[in-house]
Image (spheres, grey):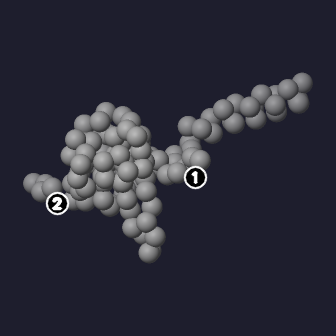
Protein backbone atom coordinates (compact mmCIF):
# COMPACT_ATOMS: atom_id res chain seq x y z
CA UNK A 1 0.00 0.00 0.00
CA UNK A 2 2.81 2.40 0.91
CA UNK A 3 4.51 1.77 -2.48
CA UNK A 4 1.27 2.58 -4.29
CA UNK A 5 0.85 5.90 -2.45
CA UNK A 6 4.45 6.86 -3.15
CA UNK A 7 4.10 5.90 -6.83
CA UNK A 8 0.85 7.83 -7.27
CA UNK A 9 2.32 10.88 -5.52
CA UNK A 10 5.43 10.77 -7.71
CA UNK A 11 3.36 10.45 -10.90
CA UNK A 12 1.16 13.38 -9.85
CA UNK A 13 4.27 15.49 -9.22
CA UNK A 14 5.79 14.59 -12.59
CA UNK A 15 2.52 15.43 -14.36
CA UNK A 16 2.76 18.97 -12.96
CA UNK A 17 6.31 19.60 -14.21
CA UNK A 18 5.52 20.74 -17.79
CA UNK A 19 3.36 23.56 -16.41
CA UNK A 20 6.43 24.87 -14.57
CA UNK A 21 8.83 24.53 -17.51
CA UNK A 22 8.77 28.20 -18.52
CA UNK A 23 10.40 31.10 -16.73
CA UNK A 24 8.90 34.63 -16.74
CA UNK A 25 11.45 37.00 -18.28
CA UNK A 26 11.79 40.51 -19.69
CA UNK A 27 13.53 40.72 -23.06
CA UNK A 28 14.98 43.81 -24.70
CA UNK A 29 16.19 43.51 -28.27
CA UNK A 30 15.34 43.62 -31.93
CA UNK A 31 12.06 42.05 -33.09
CA UNK A 32 11.81 40.92 -36.69
CA UNK A 33 10.16 38.42 -38.99
CA UNK A 34 11.87 35.02 -39.13
CA UNK A 35 10.85 34.66 -42.80
CA UNK A 36 11.19 38.17 -44.24
CA UNK A 37 14.19 39.48 -42.28
CA UNK A 38 16.15 36.44 -41.06
CA UNK A 39 15.31 33.99 -43.86
CA UNK A 40 15.16 31.19 -41.23
CA UNK A 41 11.54 30.13 -41.71
CA UNK A 42 9.10 29.33 -44.50
CA UNK A 43 6.32 31.18 -42.67
CA UNK A 44 6.08 34.62 -41.10
CA UNK A 45 6.83 34.45 -37.39
CA UNK A 46 8.17 37.01 -34.96
CA UNK A 47 11.57 36.43 -33.38
CA UNK A 48 13.39 38.62 -30.87
CA UNK A 49 17.17 38.91 -31.11
CA UNK A 50 18.73 39.74 -27.73
CA UNK A 51 22.40 40.66 -27.34
CA UNK A 52 23.77 39.68 -23.95
CA UNK A 53 27.41 39.62 -22.83
CA UNK A 54 28.77 39.44 -26.35
CA UNK A 55 26.40 36.71 -27.54
CA UNK A 56 23.20 36.95 -29.54
CA UNK A 57 20.22 34.82 -28.55
CA UNK A 58 17.20 34.36 -30.79
CA UNK A 59 13.83 33.87 -29.07
CA UNK A 60 11.12 32.40 -31.30
CA UNK A 61 7.77 33.95 -30.40
CA UNK A 62 5.01 31.41 -29.87
CA UNK A 63 1.73 32.06 -31.62
CA UNK A 64 -0.81 33.71 -29.31
CA UNK A 65 -3.10 36.79 -29.56
CA UNK A 66 -0.34 39.19 -28.39
CA UNK A 67 2.08 37.84 -31.03
CA UNK A 68 -0.52 37.91 -33.81
CA UNK A 69 -1.47 41.52 -33.08
CA UNK A 70 2.16 42.68 -33.01
CA UNK A 71 3.59 40.80 -36.01
CA UNK A 72 2.40 43.36 -38.58
CA UNK A 73 4.76 45.86 -36.88
CA UNK A 74 7.83 43.78 -37.71
CA UNK A 75 6.95 41.97 -40.92
CA UNK A 76 9.46 43.22 -43.53
CA UNK A 77 11.28 45.49 -41.00
CA UNK A 78 12.92 45.20 -37.59
CA UNK A 79 12.04 47.15 -34.47
CA UNK A 80 13.70 47.57 -31.06
CA UNK A 81 11.30 46.22 -28.43
CA UNK A 82 10.77 45.40 -24.80
CA UNK A 83 8.82 42.20 -24.23
CA UNK A 84 7.66 40.14 -21.28
CA UNK A 85 6.77 36.49 -21.43
CA UNK A 86 7.40 32.93 -20.44
CA UNK A 87 10.65 31.56 -21.84
CA UNK A 88 11.55 27.93 -22.40
CA UNK A 89 14.17 25.98 -24.33
CA UNK A 90 13.14 23.10 -26.55
CA UNK A 91 15.21 21.18 -29.08
CA UNK A 92 18.05 23.69 -28.80
CA UNK A 93 15.84 26.73 -29.53
CA UNK A 94 14.60 29.43 -27.18
CA UNK A 95 10.86 30.15 -27.26
CA UNK A 96 8.84 32.91 -25.62
CA UNK A 97 5.09 33.09 -25.06
CA UNK A 98 4.42 36.81 -24.96
CA UNK A 99 2.42 38.49 -22.22
CA UNK A 100 3.28 41.94 -23.65
CA UNK A 101 5.49 43.58 -26.26
CA UNK A 102 6.07 47.26 -27.05
CA UNK A 103 8.42 49.27 -29.22
CA UNK A 104 11.26 50.75 -27.11
CA UNK A 105 10.61 54.27 -28.32
CA UNK A 106 6.91 54.19 -27.40
CA UNK A 107 6.08 57.12 -25.16
CA UNK A 108 4.04 56.41 -22.04
CA UNK A 109 2.18 59.14 -20.14
Instruction: Return the mark for residue 105.
Output: 2
Q: Position of residue 64 (x, y in %)?
A: 36, 34
Residue at point 22%, 41% (across, down): 72
Residue 26 shows in this picture: yes
Say which element carries label 2. loop
40 sits to left or right of 17? left
Residue at image position (66%, 32%) is 15
Q: Nearer the viewer, mark 2 or mark 1?
A: 1
Tell me the tag on residue 28: none
For disc 1, the neighbor class at 10 Å (few under 14, some 14 to 19, many from 20) is few
Q: Is residue 31 above or below residue 62?
A: below
Q: Quadrant of residue 82?
A: bottom left
Residue sitting nearer the eye, 24 or 71:
71
The number of numbered discs placed on residues in the rendered structure image is 2
What residue sits 25% from the left and 55% below the top? 78
Marks 2/1: CA–CA distance: 31 Å
Q: 7 and 92: which one is in front?
A: 92
Residue beneath label 1, please?
Answer: 92
Percent across and percent down for residue 89 are 55, 50
- What residue is rendered at 31% in x and 33% in y? 65
Looking at the image, which is closer to me, 76 or 89? 76
Q: Is residue 99 visible?
A: no
Quarter of the image with the N terminus in it: top right
The residue lying toward the viewer, choosing from 15 and 45, is 45
Q: Is residue 51 left or right of residue 18?
A: left
Name which of mark 2 and mark 1 comes first in the sequence: 1
Horizontal side, residue 37 vs residue 10: left or right: left
Q: Residue 84: give x, y in percent of width and height.
A: 35, 50
Q: Position of residue 45 (x, y in %)?
A: 36, 42
Amino acid sequence: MKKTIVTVTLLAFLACLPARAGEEKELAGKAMCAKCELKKSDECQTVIEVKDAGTTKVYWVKDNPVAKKFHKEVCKKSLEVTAKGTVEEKDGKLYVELASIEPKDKKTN
